[in-house]
Image (cartoon, helix red, strand yellow):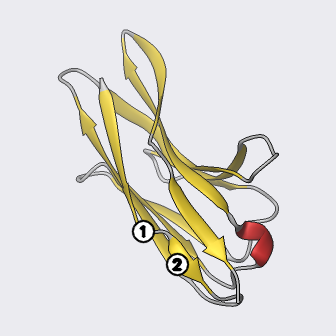
Amino acid sequence: QVQLVESGGGLVQPGGSLRLSCEASLSTYYSINDMGWYRQAPGNQRELVAVVSYGGETRYAGAAKGRFSISMDNAKNTVTLQMNSLKPEDTAVYYCYAEASYLRKQEFWGQGTQVTVSS
């Protein structure tokens, strides 16, 4: 199994910055393929924010491009999302995501951390 522990989040004013981190704890034989972040605002479906592969390839949703930056520390199985120039519409619960392999690909999710952008 893979357990994901998130940190960061909170309340920030528009234009401010926040950093989210997520550390994966892996059971024996599991290996990480991708890690990233999704978010879900009230009344909306969960949507991609950004994903990074173990090899360092990144993918961003349109709303995140130019403002957010994702990176992964392979040695620590930790993914970090730096969010700058935050807007009220970025308000959502942010979920850490990991795709890992052991015999087959599996998806794992964190419990979520609230990000609120408000003055």
The reply to whether residue 117 is visible in this rendering is: yes
The answer to whether 58 is drawn above or below residue 43 in the figure is below
| 77 or 25, nearer to the observer | 25
Q: At x 37% / y 9%, what residue is drawn?
A: 103
Extreme-top residue of the structure: 103
Q: Within the image, what quadrant is residue 87 found in?
A: bottom right
Which quadrant holds the C terminus? bottom right
Mark before the other along the chain sequence, 1 or 2: 1
- Neighbourhood count class around disc 1 (C-alpha, 10 Å): few under 14, some 14–19, many 20 upward: some
Q: Position of residue 1 (x, y in %)?
A: 30, 23
Residue receiving disc 2: 18
- Neighbourhood count class around disc 2 (C-alpha, 10 Å): few under 14, some 14–19, many 20 upward: some
The reply to whether residue 52 is visible in this rendering is: no
| 92 or 70, nearer to the observer | 92
Three-letter residue code for mark 2: Leu
Q: Position of residue 32 (x, y in %)?
A: 37, 35
Using residue 103 as the reference point, say whether residue 57 is left or right of it: right
Q: Secondary structure at mark 1?
A: loop
Q: Secondary structure at mark 2?
A: strand
Q: At x 24% / y 53%, what residue is drawn?
A: 76
The answer to whether 107 is drawn above or below residue 116 in the figure is above
Extreme-left residue of the structure: 28
Q: At x 62% / y 89%, what residue is drawn?
A: 16
Q: Does the CB distance between marks 1 and 2 fall below 8 Å?
A: yes
Q: How many marks?
A: 2
Residue receiving disc 1: 8
Q: Position of residue 61 (x, y in %)?
A: 76, 56
Q: Within the image, what quadrant is residue 117 found in?
A: bottom right
Three-letter residue code for mark 1: Gly
Q: At x 52% / y 78%, what residue is drawn?
A: 18
The Cα atoms of the two marked residues, 1 and 2, are separated by: 7 Å
Using residue 89 as the reference point, say whether residue 18 is left or right of it: left
